Amino acid sequence: MAMATSNDHKVTQIRFLTETTFVLRFTRGNIRFRAGQHIIVGLSGEMDQREYSIYSSEDDDHLEILVKEVEKGNISSKLKSCKQGELLQVNGPFGSFGIEPFYLNTRKHIFIATGTGISPFHSMIRTWPGINYTLIHGVRVSSEAYESNEYEPARYILCTSKENIRGRKGRVTSFLPKFRITPDMLFYLCGNGNMTYEVYYILRDKGVPDENIISEVYF
């Protein structure tokens, strides 16, 4: 068994949201972060690691990440099998994705995510629950609306590409051209690369300047 180090953090909970997607909670240690940043996580003593946006609030006494098990995904499969008390190696935080303090209460924040790309926005909203935000979340089916009950219903827009049970049928990129834009909006994009690039050009075509579009790409 590997000896614990200062980078090791103990798993305290695993919360399944679907059969393949879960929230992994572990001790925070001395990590301080800003909502929107990511950490690098792997099993203690192993070389394989992966970047995950932090899902928890800046004020929580623990850390959480939102993980989707992917086919042939070495790290996600191992994390899915974690037991309470198991040690993770955690490095970071890293990155500058997030809300500039000056804009917290002076702008409308439009969060656009696909899949688990919602993770940094969950952290931001939990950290600053009073901000003026709209969250547009693109998924395949409504069961992938991860913990949507944590967001104000009037501020959460679900775009489902494979069903029309709730929310809006169609991809995020089909919904956005009809979305009303005002000059005080800042747009934050997090998800797969194709979505991010498509949304960027949709926003550009609608007159949003580059400096009002902030992106974090997941691959």
Image (cartoon, rainbow, N blue to C red):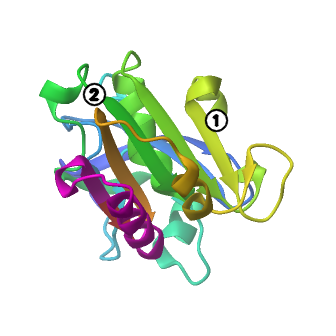
Note whether residue 1 is visible. Answer: no
Residue 82, picture quadrant: bottom right
Q: 128 or 213, which is in the foreground?
A: 213
Q: Position of residue 37 (x, y in %)?
A: 25, 47
For residue 162, above or below residue 194: above
Q: Which mark is residue 148?
A: 1
Residue lying at the far top of the rendered structure: 130
Cβ–Cβ below 8 Å for labels 1 and 2? no
**Mark identifier at residue 39:** none
Measured from the top left, where is residue 193 in percent x and y? 41, 73
> Which residue: 22% across, 53% down?
209
Q: Secondary structure at mark 2?
A: loop
Q: Residue at x 24, y 42 (%)?
A: 98
> Magenta residues, as a range?
192-215
Identify the residue position indicated by label 2 in the image: 107
In the rendered structure, the answer to whether residue 143 lies left or right of residue 26 reads: right
Q: CA distance from mark 1 to mark 2?
A: 23 Å
Local secondary structure at mark 1: helix
Identified by mark 1, the residue type is Ser
Query: Which residue sits at x=51%, y=61%?
Result: 79
Q: Is residue 135 above or below residue 81?
A: above
